[in-house]
Amino acid sequence: MKILVLNCGSSSFKYQLIDMNGEVVLAKGLVERIGIGGSKIKHVKTGIEPVSREVDFSNHTVAIKYVLDMLTDPEYGVLKNLSELSAVGHRIVHGGEKFTKSVLVTPEVISAIEEVIPLAPLHNPANIQGVRALMEVLPNTPNVVVFDTAFHQTMPPKAYMYGIQYKYYEEDRVRRYGFHGTSHFYVANRAAEILGKPIESLKIVTCHLGNGSSITAVDDGKSVDTSLGYGTAEGIIMGTRSGNLDPSVMVFLMEKLKDPKLVNEEVQKKSGLQGISGISSDLRDIEKAAEDGNERAKLAQDMLVYDVKKYIGSYSAGMGGIDALVFTAGIGENGISFREEVCKGLEFMGIKIDSEKNKVRGQEVVFSTPDSRVAVMVIPTDEEMVIARDTKRCCGA
Ligand code: AMP
């Protein structure tokens, strides 16, 4: 069974073609600048040199048709014809409270995704665009939608409610939703597999740390708390997002900037590592500048490490201890000194690391010492594989 996984943004999308027989990635690629001029595609057939082309993609449908042609191309393709494609899995950012798991696309499902557009005004419309384009080009191929929020729907109300009047939840659905759910799900389950224990017996803190970041408490295989909330700026300091703020700071910004749009831009795009350091949103640049003596870069670096430590501590307290701590995504998979700094001083809670074993980038490793009570691990995330597996399951295969 061959499945196409699509992660569609407003002017770009990523794709992967996966053969579920052995879970092998046959091809993948990235299409950028759709509808805004200068559009291009980078296509990689596993095992041969990548191809990059500049092609005029006026909309998503045109771009998807081109990708399907690439996938069936005699030289760069991996399919004899499109009838070999069994289904398409789509990443959808927000499923509100309605979607607790992945589902086959029907007209009702599309309407329900549209209903929660106010909760993800930038992402959901772009995600739906991908689904619609696929339905237009391949009307007989089943589509499955997989939600970033679904894994977190197991959180209890004490974790997802905010301490404001209850009516805002009842009338407007203001609550914590959480994001990066497919990633947290994947690494938590992979951690259990690596440890050779049933996930139901484990309490795990998963740290998805990239440009956007979130930390999740996983108990009994279920998300019981997560650091991103109603929107995508809560929790730890991120590349350009503020992380937690006193509500009074939001009131201050509102009075100073006088426009909710500007306040949103401030906390989403001008804050975080970028805002504090004034240098970059990328931890590599921050680490380099801090090493060269830049004090604001050092402050940004320290704030990130401190935030992550605080979440590990609070989620461990919430769950009554932890068995495993997992790092994933760009910073989690590659930040060697960052991981070392986060774990430093956590020996009191049974976290002891082996600095030599920690010296890896982008590969699975358990880097705690054999006598550490908590297994500390790096697990590269694989959201596409979760989407492909769910797509297969929803198609009854
Ligand atoms: P992601 O959003 O998961 O692609 O993560 C991107 C982020 O990973 C970048 O902005 C960097 O801050 C971070 N990153 C990537 N490589 C490294 C590295 N070698 N050391 C520290 N941070 C890294």
Image (cartoon, grey):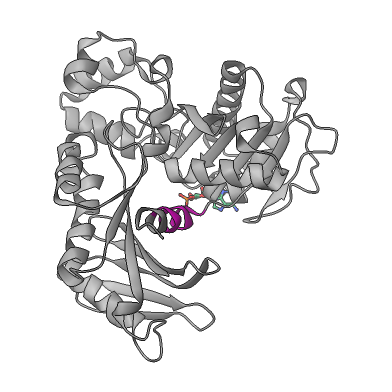
The quadrant in which the C terminus is found is bottom left
Residue at the spot 41% in from the left edge and 52% down from the top edge: 390
Residue at the spot 49% in from the left edge and 83% down from the top edge: 49
391 vs 61: above or below:
above
Asked if residue 336 lies in the magenta stretch, the reply is no
Give the quarter of the image for residue 152: top left
From the image, give the main secondary structure of the stretch colored magenta. Answer: helix
Give the quarter of the image for residue 268: top left
Report x, y in % for residue 47. 54, 81
Which residue ends up furthest to the right in the rendered image? Answer: 371
Whether residue 159 appears in this view of the structure is yes
Which residue ends up furthest to the top in the rendered image? Answer: 165
41 horizontally vs 120: left or right: right
| Viewer-side residue, 269 vs 122 | 122
Residue at the spot 20% in from the left edge and 46% down from the top edge: 109
Whether residue 53 appears in this view of the structure is no
Residue at the spot 50% in from the left edge and 42% down from the top edge: 185
The quadrant in which the N terminus is found is bottom left
Report x, y in % for residue 168. 21, 15
Asked if residue 385 lies in the magenta stretch, the reply is yes
Give the quarter of the image for residue 245: top left
268 vs 73: above or below:
above
Report x, y in % for residue 211. 44, 45
Which residue ends up furthest to the bottom in the rendered image? Answer: 74
335 vs 166: above or below:
below
**Residue stretch in magenta:** 382-390
197 vs 41: above or below:
above
139 horizontally vs 211: left or right: left
